[in-house]
Image: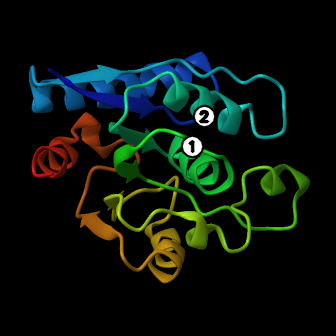
Amino acid sequence: MQKQIIFIHGGGSPEDFQADEKLAVSLRKELGPGYSVHYPFLPNDGTPDLGRRKQIAHEIDVSEDGVILVAHSLGASMLLACLSEAEIAKNIGGIFLLATPFWQGDEDWVKAFELKPGFAGNMDRKTPLFFYHCLDDEEVPVAQVTHYKHHLPWATFREIAQGGHQFDNNVAIVAEDIKSM
């Protein structure tokens, strides 16, 4: 039986979905036939958070118990928000977050993406949690990882020398960690 993975893309446009599809394809290739990678398009529904929390919760709800969650950029930050705010009935096999922004600021649009105070206390410490960030990411500065290291010190953090925001469309390191579980 294949292990189920849901890959959550960043952004909210079809172009963002297409850009991240290369990451999902890389993950499928690196994991091989023992894994099924589901890559749903999560469109901007016009709400302040683009509908992400609700959409991600739905994808998890219709998945198998033990699902592995992989997410990139905005999708990664919204996955964390969803997991720390919603009642999730499924057992999560692991969480793998790539280029995860840590939203902060006084702008109204930022508020919709921010994690709630105390979010880390709502995360299951028994679920493997990995963060990946390329040091040359110009979209989400690597300094933002520091916030996650502070709030989630039990997580595993992998800093990659180069690959930019899109990891040069190669997530072999993520596949290695998934296979090692």
Please state which of the two labelled residues, at mark 2 or mark 1, is closer to the viewer.
Answer: 1
Residue 71: % across, % down: 43, 41
Tell me if 78 is positioned left or right of 39 in this view.
Answer: right
Q: Quadrant of residue 54?
A: top right
The reply to whether callout 2 and callout 1 are in contact (CB within 8 Å) is yes
Query: Counting other residues with Cα less than 10 Å from the Cα at mark 2, is it few (<14), some (14-19), or many (20 or more)?
Result: some
Residue 170: % across, % down: 21, 38
Dot 2 amino acid type: Ala
Numbered mark located on residue 142 in the image: none
> Which residue lies under the disc numbered 1?
88
- Label whose residue precedes the other's in the sequence (2 or 1): 2
Dot 1 amino acid type: Ile
Residue 57: % across, % down: 60, 34
> Which residue lies under the disc numbered 2?
57
Quadrant containing the N terminus in the rendered view: top left
Q: Give the residue displayed 41% in from the left and 48% down from the top.
A: 165
Judge by depth and name the residue closer to the eye, 29 or 87.
87
Residue 51: % across, % down: 73, 31
Q: CA distance from mark 2 to mark 1?
A: 7 Å
Secondary structure type for disc 2: helix
